[in-house]
Image: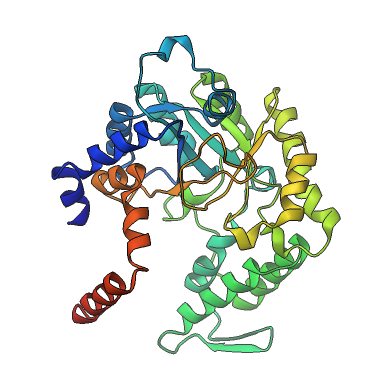
């Protein structure tokens, strides 16, 4: 409702105009999966109103101030479409959209998952709790009675938290293996399972996309740990630097950009940023909300979270910066109190 109001009253168009007038800006959207939502509708809107570029090309223009002569009369704001993690549907669907509609995408890959074919760790909690055949399990001194209402949801959250806050990749994987054994999981899902499209793409698929010309790749660590939680600095630096080396070896060209796993300020920190610089990357993206200007730190670039389940009107408002504006207004006392009261009336 609010997104429709923004669009049809002209506020979205006004926000786009204001962004153009404000000087050089680059908007970076952050997606993950591609199938089952409204990705194509998003792209058709964005292609019309923004100049969509790869991350590398957009950053070259932003920091050099030199615009491609082909687009010297194009006043649209540059926008970058990124996908984190490298889900297989980035190959089966997103790459097709990129090719058919001539839209460049930037995808951040995790070589460890490409090579292992394992389920991403942040999906294990939900998968294990759903597939558990044990009626009772104790993990790290926490006991779950899985035949009781709500217990499987609590188990899923516990597994996710334990994996998320692990202080090393070995600790995380050891815990997940132990949990899998104790839960007596039903067989690994086949192609008919709803999680099939949530696996990583493989090297052959990445190489095919790379040759197609519409996909640019970046690095997302070797195994997707949350870098600020890793206690061993050597392991932290390895996750960052080795990822670039492997991708360059497999794809045959330089990898210039990096995406921090999870990517909020508390998940990064100065030692992590320094390791990214030392690994030879030219820029790195966070998940901190905002637009990017020539004054932006190239190793702490902002992105706007987008989701294929969102209506294209919501993405229109997001890309224009209106959701961020409303979010900031919510912290003003008068608006915050009225917003809170409205939510209470709706029972939320």
Q: Quadrant of the C terminus?
A: bottom left
The front one of 96 and 328 is 328
Residue drawn at x 65%, y 48% is 113
Left or right of 117 in this view: 30: left
Q: Image height check: is 245 above or below 237?
A: above
| x and y percentages locating residue 224 in the rendered image | 65, 53
The front one of 234 and 26 is 26
| x and y percentages locating residue 117 in the rendered image | 63, 48
- Name the quadrant containing residue 11: top left
The front one of 346 and 195 is 346
Left or right of 38 in this view: 122: right
Q: Is residue 242 visible?
A: no
| x and y percentages locating residue 177 in the rendered image | 69, 68
Residue drawn at x 36%, y 18% is 74
Left or right of 292 in this view: 101: left
Residue drawn at x 38%, y 50% is 307
Q: Image height check: is 297 above or below 148?
A: above
Q: Residue furthest top?
A: 69
Q: Quadrant of the N terminus?
A: bottom left
Residue drawn at x 52%, y 19% is 213
The front one of 254 and 285 is 285
Q: Is residue 20 visible?
A: yes
């Amino acid at each position: 409702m609010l997104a429709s109001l923004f669009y049809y009253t002209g506020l979205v168009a006004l926000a786009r105009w204001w962004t153009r007038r404000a000087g050089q800006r680059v908007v970076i959207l952050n997606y993950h999966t591609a199938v089952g939502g409204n990705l194509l509708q998003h792209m058709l809107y964005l292609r019309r109103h923004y100049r969509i570029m790869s991350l590398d090309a957009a950053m070259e223009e932003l920091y050099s101030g030199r615009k491609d002569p082909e687009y010297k009369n194009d006043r649209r704001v540059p926008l970058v479409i990124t996908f984190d993690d490298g889900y297989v549907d980035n190959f089966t669907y997103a790459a097709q959209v990129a090719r058919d509609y001539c839209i460049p995408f930037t995808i951040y890959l995790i070589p460890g998952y490409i090579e292992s074919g394992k389920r991403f760790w942040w999906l294990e909690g939900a998968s294990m709790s759903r597939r558990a055949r044990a009626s009772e399990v104790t993990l790290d001194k926490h006991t779950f009675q899985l035949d009781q209402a709500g217990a499987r949801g609590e188990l899923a959250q516990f597994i996710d938290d334990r994996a998320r806050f692990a202080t090393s990749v070995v600790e995380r994987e050891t815990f997940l293996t132990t949990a899998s054994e104790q839960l007596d999981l039903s067989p690994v899902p086949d192609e008919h399972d709803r999680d099939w499209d949530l696996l990583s793409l493989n090297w052959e698929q990445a190489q095919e996309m790379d040759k197609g010309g519409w996909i640019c790749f970046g690095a997302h660590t070797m195994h997707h740990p949350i870098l600020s939680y890793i206690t061993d600095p050597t392991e932290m630096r390895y996750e960052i630097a080795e990822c670039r080396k492997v991708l360059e070896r497999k794809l045959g060209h330089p990898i210039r950009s990096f995406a921090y796993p999870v990517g909020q300020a508390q998940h990064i920190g100065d030692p992590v940023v320094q390791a990214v610089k030392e690994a030879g990357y030219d820029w790195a993206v966070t998940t901190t909300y905002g637009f990017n200007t020539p004054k932006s730190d190239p190793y702490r670039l902002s992105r706007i979270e987008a989701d294929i389940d969102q209506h294209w009107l919501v993405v229109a408002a997001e890309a224009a910066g209106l959701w961020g504006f409303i979010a900031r207004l919510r912290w003003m006392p008068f608006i915050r109190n009225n917003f809170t009261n409205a939510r209470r009336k709706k029972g939320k």
